[in-house]
Image (cartoon, helix red, strand yellow):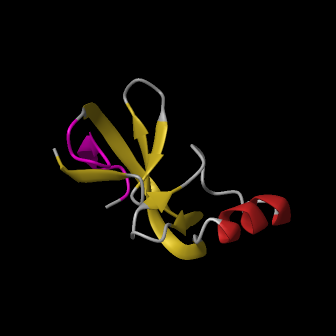
Amino acid sequence: MDGSRVKVMSGNGQTDLGLGTLVGCVPVYFFRGPEGNLLSDKLCEKKPSRAQICVMKLSGATLVEKQANPKIVLDNGDTVYGCQVWWSKA
């Protein structure tokens, strides 16, 4: 699976982000909003600060930690994660 070429779309499935390479699975952190939407920092491998967690809790969001989430490096150099996008084998 690592090294596989993948086609990537935005999280809402409306924007083609292009092709990339699946570089492996990594731990990630993101928030699940009260309506079920997912919110994350651009690079979500770093655990959010306590202050950020408190602010998000006040808005009704809960912190989610996934131990193995796909990490993809797009051909343009950007890094995205499986929890942020839709992807499939190219």
Please indicate whether residue 25 sits to the left or right of residue 41 in the image. left
Residue lying furthest front in this view?
Answer: 59
Q: Please name whichever residue, 86 or 53, is drawn nearer the observer in this view of the structure.
A: 53
Residue 36: x and y, percent? 39, 70
What residue is shown at x 35% (from left), y 49% (from top)? 3
Q: What stretch is highlighted in magenta?
A: 2-14
Please indicate whether residue 76 sits to the left or right of residue 44 in the image. left
Residue lying furthest left in this view?
Answer: 90
Residue 44: x and y, percent? 60, 54
Please indicate whether residue 15 sits to the left or right of residue 61 in the image. left
Number of labelled discs?
0
Q: Is residue 24 above or below residue 60?
A: above
On-image quarter of the N terminus = bottom left
Q: In which quarter of the image is residue 70?
A: bottom left
Is residue 82 within the magenta segment? no
Q: In this view, does 8 lie above or below 35?
A: above
Q: Please name whichever residue, 14 or 18, is drawn nearer the observer in this view of the structure.
A: 14
What residue is shown at x 46% (from left), y 66% (from top)? 69
On-image quarter of the C terminus = top left
Q: In which quarter of the image is residue 24?
A: bottom left
Q: In which quarter of the image is residue 2?
A: bottom left
Q: In this view, does 34 lie above or below 88?
A: below
What residue is shown at x 33% (from left), y 38% (from top)? 20
Q: Is residue 12 above or below residue 79?
A: below
Residue 52: x and y, percent? 76, 58
